[in-house]
Image: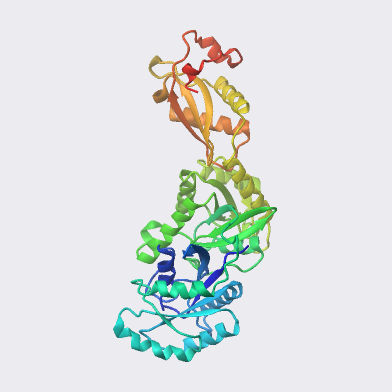
Amino acid sequence: MKIPIVVIVGRPNVGKSTLFNRILRRRAAIVDDRPGVTRDRHYARAEWRGRSFFLVDTGGLVPQSRDRMEISIKKQVEAAILESDLLLMVVDAKDGLLGTDQHIADLLRRSRKPLVLAVNKVDSARDEDAVHQFHRLGLGEPYMVSAASGRSSGDLLDAVFEKLNFEEGSEKEPEGIKVALLGKPNVGKSSLVNAITGQERVIVDSEPGTTRDAVDTVFHWQGNRLILVDTAGLRRKPRVGDELEFYTRLRTERAIEQSDVGVLVLDAQEEPGHLDLSLAGMLDQADRAVVLAVNKWDLSREKNQARYLGWLRERMAFLPYVRPVFTSALKGFGVSHLLQEIESSYRQWRKQHDPELLKAAFEETVQQYHPPSPGGKEVMLLAIRQMGICPPTFEVLTNQPKLVAESYRRYLINGLRERLGIRGTPLRISFKLSRPPQDWQHKRYLDYGQRPKFKAENTDF
C-alpha cells in the first residue's frame, strides 16, 4: 500500500520551499532569496488530519530555457510529476501571472494528474485582488496562502487532502537501512546513487556543489530496503561564509545523525585531505556504521589496490575497522561489492554477540597483554558484557576504572574486533568499578582458564 505523493511545482523563487517547510512545520528544505537553490527532488513525510502523505519539493521550472542546469532541473521535475498522485502548483501574487506560469500550467494539465493551485505571498487582504488573474491558468479555484506566515495554509491542505486517495494500510512504511553518502564536492556521490539505482535519480554535473540538499532515494537490493541519502558536498569551514552554505553543512551533519550507515566517498585521483578526515571523524564520533568508497578508481594513476590501501591506512589510522571498496560509478565497477559492504556493516553495527564467545575473546585478549599498573596499583579486568547495539557497546568490570589507560582501551577494542570478526562499525567500551573476590590471585588472573567463578554481588551482573 503506497502513501500518496504530493509534488510542489512552480517557476523559480515563488516560495515552493517555504511552503514545503510550512506544511512540514520544520525547516526541511533550504530557503534562500536566490532563484535555483532547490535543484533535486526533496522528499519528506507530512501529516494532515491524521493521515500521511509524501511531500516533494522540486527545483524552479523554466520550461523553455536552454541553460544546462535548468534543463537538468526540468528533467527532475518531469520525473517527479510522473510519480506523483497530486500536483500542487505555486505562483506568486506579488509578480502576477507570467508567461512561464502559463507554460508550467500547460505541462501539468497534460499530465492528467489531480491539481491544486496555490497563490503564494498573499500576506494580507490588500494582496487578494491580484489573485483573480490566475483563473486564466484553467487549474480551478486558486487558494490564497502566505507560506511565510502560514496564512490560510490549513485551507490549502484541506483542498489537497480532499483530492488524495488514501488507501487502507498505507500508513505502514517498511523499515530500511538508512545510508548517507558523504564526501567533498564532485567526488561522484550523485553518480554512485544513479549507478546503484540504475536510473538518473539525482542531477549529476561536473560543476562542484550541484547537490545542495540531502535527497532520499528508496532502493531494494537482495531483500533489503535501502534509503540512500545523497548529501551536498562539504567545503572547508573557512569557505562557509553565507547562510546557504551554513544550512548545507548543517543538513549534512543531520543526515549523519539520521543514518544507520555512512558511506564516505573519496576521489581516487586525489589524496585524502583535511575535509575527508573531518568527515571520517564525524562518522566515527556519531557511532554510525562506516563504509569507505574509493570512487573513480578507473581514472586513478595508482593501479595497485594493495599499495593504495597501505597508503590510505596511514592517513586514516583512526578507522582501522573500515575496509575500503574500489568503485567506478560511471562504469558500474564495484557497485555490488559496495552494497554488500553496506549490508554487512549494518549487520555488525546491530549485532548482539554471544556471551560465551565474547567472554572467550575478552579473556584471550587480556591474557596476551596485561593492563599496565600505574603507580604500582594493579589493574584487574574481571569480566565483560555487552550493554547495547548501534554500535556494539561493552562494559568491563575492573577494580580500577580510572587507571585503565586510553592506549589499553584501544588495544582491548582492537583485540575484540579481531577475535570476533567485527568490521564496518565502531566499538565502545566503558569501565565500571567492581570488587574482586578476596581469594583473587595474580597467577589466576594471568591464566584465564583457572579464573574463579564470581558471585553476582562481586560482578554486579
377 is higher (above) or lower (below) than 271: above
User: In terms of image quadrants, where is residue 386?
Assistant: top right
Q: Residue at x 59, y 22 (%)?
A: 364
User: In terms of image quadrants, where is residue 197?
Assistant: bottom right
392 relative position to 329: left or right? left
153 is higher (above) or lower (below) than 217: below
429 is higher (above) or lower (below) than 225: above
Residue 261 in view of the camera: yes
Q: Position of residue 251 (x, y in %)?
A: 44, 59
211 relative position to 219: left or right? left
Its colouring scheme is: rainbow
Return the residue nearer the eye: 290 or 254. 254
Q: Residue at x 48, y 61 (%)?
A: 233
Q: Position of residue 208 (x, y in %)?
A: 49, 66
Return the residue nearer the eye: 124 or 356. 124
Q: Position of residue 270 (x, y in %)?
A: 54, 56
| Quarter of the figure that contains the N terminus | bottom right
Q: How many marks are shown on the rendered structure?
A: 0
Q: Residue at x 48, y 62 (%)?
A: 50
Q: Position of residue 412 (x, y in %)?
A: 52, 29
Residue 64 in view of the camera: no
For this orientation, the residue located farthest to the top is 439
